[in-house]
């Protein structure tokens, strides 16, 4: 697997949407990544890395201890996280809980919207701001349900905690 340097990452161009396409590789020598980076499957990152907002990671990526993720990052299947990793309002599309600490709301992805509509029996069309307005008045009652999975409960509790 190719090992990348900070200089190589800094010199990658951004596309018309401002995204930096980062190929699969070994990024363990790099500690800081800006916003809007998109990484391929199987990338490796060292301890203490930080990522800006809106980064996305392919499946099988591995992160060292203490990595930090900006808002709205998303993760592919089977990624692994070292101890002490923290994400700010990540997108999460899996049936298991995020294996890292989270701050702010955990956002279900657009691909899971139909699942959540069925589970909550609430119209979840529109943008997250519109969805939030529909869910917030019902959140306490939803959290009283006994049929929520651990992952569903954690996501919904993140929305409740962000209100407090």
Image: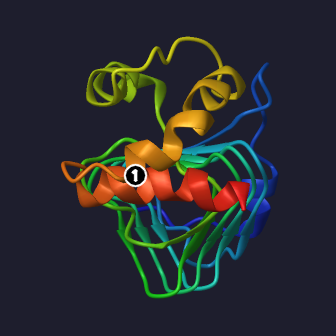
Image position of 67 with respect to 152: above or below: below
Image position of 15 with respect to 58: above or below: above
Which quadrant holds residue 21? top right
Q: Using the image as rendered, state which of residue 26 and residue 108 is in the foreground.
A: 108
Tag count: 1
Residue 53 % position (x, y): 74, 50
Image quarter of the C terminus: bottom right
Task: From the image, tell me which residue sits under label 1.
Answer: 143
Q: In the figure, is residue 163 to the left or right of 4?
A: right
Residue 67 % position (x, y): 59, 77
Q: In the figure, is residue 79 to the left or right of 35?
A: left
Q: Using the image as rendered, state which of residue 58 and residue 81 is in the foreground.
A: 81
Which quadrant holds residue 113? top left
Question: Is residue 19 something that shows in the picture?
Answer: yes
Image quarter of the N terminus: bottom left
Residue 83 % position (x, y): 44, 87
Residue at horizontal 70%, vertical 52%? Answer: 71
Residue at horizontal 27%, vertical 30%? Answer: 119
Estimate how packed mark 1 is, as few (under 14), some (14 to 19) or many (20 or more) residues with alpha carbons within 10 Å: some
Image position of 94 with respect to 150: above or below: above
Residue at horizontal 24%, vertical 48%? Answer: 95
Q: How is the image coloured?
A: rainbow
Q: In the figure, is residue 46 to the left or right of 78?
A: right
Question: Is residue 24 something that shows in the picture?
Answer: no
Judged from the image, the secondary structure of the residue bearing numbered disc 1 is: helix
Image position of 125 with respect to 113: above or below: above
Residue 143 % position (x, y): 40, 51
Q: Using the image as rendered, state which of residue 20 and residue 69 is in the foreground.
A: 69
């Amino acid at each position: 697997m190719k090992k990348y340097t900070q200089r190589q990452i800094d010199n990658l161009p951004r596309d018309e949407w401002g995204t930096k396409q980062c190929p699969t590789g070994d990024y363990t020598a790099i500690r800081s990544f800006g916003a809007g980076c998109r990484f391929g499957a199987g990338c490796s990152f060292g301890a203490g890395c930080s990522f800006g907002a809106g980064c996305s990671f392919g499946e099988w990526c591995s992160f060292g201890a203490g990595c930090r993720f900006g808002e709205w990052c998303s993760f592919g299947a089977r990624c692994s996280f070292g101890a002490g990793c923290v994400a700010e309002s990540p997108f999460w599309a899996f049936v298991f809980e995020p294996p890292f600490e989270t701050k702010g709301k955990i956002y279900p992805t657009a691909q899971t919207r139909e699942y959540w509509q069925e589970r909550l029996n609430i119209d979840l069309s529109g943008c997250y701001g519109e969805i939030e307005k529909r869910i917030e008045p019902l959140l306490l009652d939803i959290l009283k349900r006994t049929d929520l999975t651990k992952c569903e409960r954690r996501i919904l509790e993140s929305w409740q905690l962000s209100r407090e």
